[in-house]
């Protein structure tokens, strides 16, 4: 599995009051390479101007129907950070898919938690983007996917619940399901779902409870295992879970990764969980973008982007 090289990240202050300023500076730094590769588009959705970046794979056959992969930023972040943060452009060029980086309204997604863009119709935004790519490019409608981190990961869960007829698979990193969505989620079709969560995440608790940004509560969520079980039930999975342990590629990162696979689901769907013991509110294989005491540890035992793409590639809609 090829390694992804990330731009060296500056260390941000531990003081939460200064984090936003530091992140803004990091965002500008990370966007320098992104603008050279990504195309930018703005569309109107529900009387709001919504924007997204996207990357077309190099040298792709014009007649080939391409998969479409949405990559969602976390709350307070920006779309332009995500190409460098995830390394998805490199994978898209190699594997031939279109990768889209949508911009959340005021840097947030309406993932169903109270007081987070409650009046913004993000479901309509994603429907509009899917329509845009179907109109402008040769898209495979059976291979539309979404992944995201934190607020973006919670939004991905909402997409799977409410647009299950369009998304074949989704992957949430450092996110579970919020309580309201867990109670209402009734997908019309099976969706393959992957979770990657750290047991020591200081923002999104692995065992469920209140999401915390510093001292601010940002809504209650169910546990990682409860989220997995919701999808096992929704997808009608009947097979016994298969568990294995990933190699400890970096013994100095203080993490270990355990994988659990639930199969035997309707229409070939699967539910998969990567538990990062000792991991934090991070993208495995990605940067340690803030100090460990603020966001926890980034595991070096796996490369999330590679695993997520392989999960998508293996699970088109049948």
Image: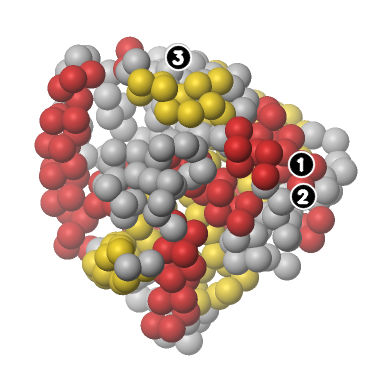
Judge left or right: residue 167 versus residue 240: left
Instruction: Determine the residue located farthest toward the bottom in the rendered image.
Output: 63
Q: Which circle's residue, 3 or 2, is located before the other in the chain?
A: 2
Residue 37, position as x, y percentages in the image: 23, 63
Query: Are dots 3 and 2 in contact, CB under 8 Å?
Result: no
Q: Is residue 99 above or below residue 173?
A: below
Judge left or right: residue 268 versus residue 178: right
* 169 and 286: which is toward the camera: 169
Residue 254, numbered circle: 3
- Per the image, the residue denoted by label 1 is 232
Residue 54, position as x, y percentages in the image: 32, 65
Judge left or right: residue 83 versus residue 204: left
Query: Are dots 1 and 2 in contact, CB under 8 Å?
Result: yes
For the point 58% across and 22% down, the residue is 208
Q: Quadrant of residue 96?
A: bottom left
For the point 13% across and 51% down, the residue is 32
Q: CA distance from mark 1 to mark 3?
A: 30 Å
Q: Is residue 83 above or below residue 251?
A: below
Local SS, label 2: loop
Q: Which circle's residue, 1 or 3, is located before the other in the chain?
A: 1
């Amino acid at each position: 599995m090829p390694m992804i090289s990330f731009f060296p990240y500056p260390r941000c202050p531990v003081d939460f009051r200064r984090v936003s300023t530091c992140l803004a500076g990091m965002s500008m730094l990370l966007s320098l390479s992104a603008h050279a590769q990504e195309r930018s588009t703005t569309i109107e959705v529900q009387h709001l101007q919504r924007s997204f970046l996207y990357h077309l794979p190099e040298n792709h056959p014009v007649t080939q129907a391409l998969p479409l992969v949405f990559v969602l930023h976390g709350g307070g972040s920006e779309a332009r950070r995500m190409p460098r943060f995830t390394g998805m452009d490199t994978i898209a060029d190699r594997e031939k898919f279109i990768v889209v980086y949508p911009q959340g309204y005021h840097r947030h997604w309406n993932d169903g938690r109270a007081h987070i863009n409650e009046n913004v119709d993000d479901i309509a935004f994603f429907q509009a983007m899917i329509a845009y790519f179907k109109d402008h490019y040769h898209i495979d409608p059976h291979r539309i996917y979404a992944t995201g981190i934190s607020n973006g990961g919670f939004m991905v869960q909402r997409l799977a619940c409410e647009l299950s007829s369009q998304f074949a698979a989704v992957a949430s990193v450092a996110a579970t399901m919020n309580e309201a969505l867990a109670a209402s989620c009734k997908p019309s079709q099976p969706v393959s779902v992957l979770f990657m969560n750290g047991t020591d995440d200081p923002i999104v608790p692995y065992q469920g409870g209140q999401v915390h940004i510093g001292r601010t509560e940002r809504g209650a969520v169910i546990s990682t295992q409860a989220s997995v079980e919701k999808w096992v039930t929704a997808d009608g999975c009947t097979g016994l879970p298969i568990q294995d342990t990933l190699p400890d590629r970096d013994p100095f990162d203080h993490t270990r990764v355990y994988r659990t696979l639930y199969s035997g689901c309707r229409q070939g769907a699967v539910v998969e969980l990567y538990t990062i013991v000792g991991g934090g509110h991070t993208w495995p294989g990605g940067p340690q973008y803030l100090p460990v005491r603020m966001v926890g540890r980034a595991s070096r035992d796996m490369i999330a982007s590679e695993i997520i793409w392989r999960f998508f590639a293996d699970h088109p809609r049948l």
